[in-house]
Amino acid sequence: MTLAEQLRAEGIEKGRAEALVKAVIKLLTKKFGMLPDEFKTRISKLDTVTLEIIIDDILEYQSLEDVKKYIS
């Protein structure tokens, strides 16, 4: 893989992660109302696998406490 290809792949992955962060924050806000800033900050630091897990399970959460196990 050339350096250009590697940088492009990293850029694509970063963009994907940012989109997942926005989706998680939007969905949790819609379900539970405004999120604390600390909650948003912690979500923004999660890896893509964890973000996908949160999105997959969002319908099962009863409160933000259910999400805290992923962001602690």
Image (cartoon, rainbow, N blue to C red):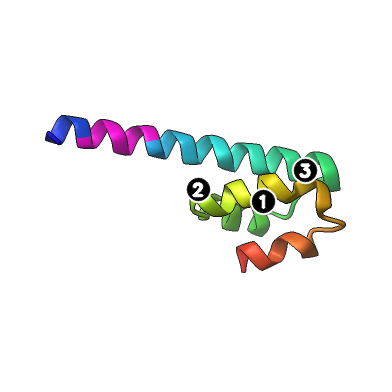
* Label 2 to label 1: alpha-carbon separation: 10 Å
Q: Is residue 32 left or right of residue 40?
A: right
Q: Residue at x 68, y 67 (%)?
A: 69
The front one of 36 and 59 is: 59
Q: Which residue is the site of mark 3?
A: 29
Question: In x, y percent, where is residue 10?
Answer: 31, 39
Q: Is residue 38 left or right of residue 34?
A: left
Q: Earlier in the sequence, mark 3 or mark 2?
A: 3
Q: Which residue is the site of mark 1?
A: 54
Question: In x, y percent, where is residue 7?
Answer: 23, 35
* Label 3 to label 2: alpha-carbon separation: 19 Å
Amino acid under label 3? Thr
Magenta range is: 6-12
Question: In x, y percent, where is residue 65?
Answer: 79, 65
Q: Are marks 2 and 1 in contact (CB under 8 Å)?
A: no
Quadrant, the C terminus: bottom right
Is residue 19 within the magenta segment?
no
Amino acid under label 1? Ile
Q: Is residue 38 left or right of residue 28?
A: left
Mark 1 surroundings: few (<14), some (14-19) or many (≥20) residues within 10 A: many
Q: Residue at x 15, y 36 (%)?
A: 1
Q: Residue at x 54, y 50 (%)?
A: 44
Q: Are marks 1 and 3 in contact (CB under 8 Å)?
A: no
Amino acid under label 2? Thr
Identify the secondary structure beneath mark 3. Answer: helix
Identify the secondary structure beneath mark 2. Answer: helix
Identify the secondary structure beneath mark 1. Answer: helix
